[in-house]
Amino acid sequence: MKDTVEAIKATSARLCLDCGKCTAVCPVSRVDGGFSPRRIVASAVSGDEEALKNEGLWHCLTCKLCSERCPSDVDYVDLTKIVRIDAYRGGEQAVCAHGSAFQLLMRIMTTPELKQKRLDWLTKDLKVSDKSDYLYFVGCLPFFDAFFEDLKANPVQIARSTVKILNAMGIEPIVLPDERCCGHDLLWAGDAKNFEMLAKHNLERLKATGAKKIVTSCPECAATLKLYYAEFAGDVPFEVYHLSELLGKSLASGQLKLRKNDKQVTFQDPCRLGRFLGVYDQPRNLLEALFGDGFKDMRRSRNASICCGTSGWIHCGIASKSIQTDRLKEARESGSTLLATACAKCKIHFMCAMKDVGFPEEAKIQVEDLAVLVASALEQ
Amino acid sequence: MNRKADSSRDGSSQEFKPKIIAFVCNWCSGTGENLQEGTAKALKRNSPNVRIVNVMCSGRVTPGLVLKAFELGADGVMVCGCEKGACHYSFGNERQAEMFETSKKLANLIGLEPERLRLDWLSPDGGEGLRKVMTEFVKQVTHVGPSPLGKSGGIE
């Protein structure tokens, strides 16, 4: 509770009490009337120990839309992070989706000696090297691939596409056989101890490679490495890029040439890429290069974009499904037949939602990752 | 951390006794009401390595539960369910067959040997089938050695 009190001061959450804009814009509150960020802050500010036991604490998507709209600059999402860590320490836990499989994999990954087989997706045509300025941080894509095979979301295709694009740019990146999960989901589930272990392990391995630039195809990895490793694990002596940021530069310089495609396409801003890292233009530039006038934003886009419905593999439920269905309808309303995203989890969540019995036919849309779209349009 | 397990691996101390978690279906394993007293004793005597977790249906055993057992230090995990067409909940065993593929893939990715996992289809026989597959599995895991997750030095 002491940390929570400190956090309230640091994030100026007291200013929330008279307002409530966060609750008005919150995508969860919209579908689940019982959830109110403002009420959670109110109970935390009042010093009520019960605040840590409030189940609503785990319903937050940490999508940062509230922080974006807050007139007083309260960082509700950072508050949530700290309060969750406090609550977790006190024995509270989130309800994990998928039988906790992912959280368990992450905790297993804190074991120092582990002979993972996480690079089996590398095919012969993909060039990687031991020494390079660039390192590709693959993240959990191979694990998603194994777990979600029936969804046909094909997450390792994102990894293969990323290496293919980097090769086309003349980069043969390092990939780490002993990479661990970046720890994003553990951090947002309040498990700071295991997050720290993963972060320290990764930092040590990354430093040992001598790479200067870390590229990720996952916005969560990028945001975690960039924003939270320094806070929990020590100095991050390299630049961290999401693939779309890197491609933006090569596209502008003409180093990367892409074939035009005539599809109607729209873009789902991943929260970590958009509101956390402020990357809005680069993926759009890529989509315009790929689809020209066929690219059109959804009604709510950029910093007003709506989350894909769940975050960190916790608390996937009826509220998540409503948010996803709503968002997919919105994608179709933009006149598009293809929804591009830049995060494997957004893709998985949307494809999962579309498999539900009774999912409206008029909201069905093809979902594809930006990396895969770019790789398939590379001019040789 | 794993001193004891290592010493058992190079044979300098007594033989390595793996810790095994067996998720068994109530209906086919004989661990439910129809377990014969003699078999129960035999199970206990013959497989001191195995912790039995009784479930109503093998369809309950998600990859998450299998991983949890490994995380807690199991050296091997086995799942037993009813034979095809015999599931008491119509398709629980078919669901397990699918989930087991996922469990195997995840275990492989994280660096656990395939021999540490086993799925068996049994028919109700008062526990005899379970006893047999357990004995085989204990032998198999003993051969593979301690889990790389390093928390288990085998059983005391």
Image (tube, helix red, strand yellow):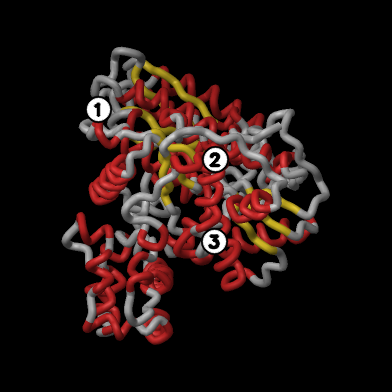
Cα distance, mark 1 to mark 2?
65 Å
Point 50% across, 66% down: residue: A192
Residue A48 appears in the rendering? yes
Q: Quadrant of residue A349?
A: top left
Residue at the image point whose x is 65% and y is 54% from the top: A246
Which of these two is toward me, B37 or A136? Answer: A136
Quadrant assignment, res A22:
bottom left
For residue B151, say whether it is visible: no
Where is residue A302 shown, x and y percent of the image? 41, 59
> In whole angstroms, how far apart are the C-alphas of marks 3 and 1?
54 Å
User: B116 or A235, which is in the foreground?
Assistant: A235
Which residue is most to the right?
A131
Badge number at residue A290: 2
A206 relative position to B63: left or right: right
Ranked by sequence position, the earlier of labels 2 and 3 is 3
Q: CA distance from mark 2 to mark 3?
A: 26 Å
Residue at mark 3: chain: A
> Is B84 or A16 nearer to us in this picture?
A16
Subunit of mark 2?
A: A
Mark 1, residue position: B33
Secondary element under disc 1, as helix, strand or loop, is loop
- Circle 3 residue: A223
Q: Would you call the spot at circle 3 few (<14 residues within 10 Å), some (14-19), or many (20 or more)?
A: many
* Outermost residue toward the front in this view: A293
- Local secondary structure at mark 2: helix
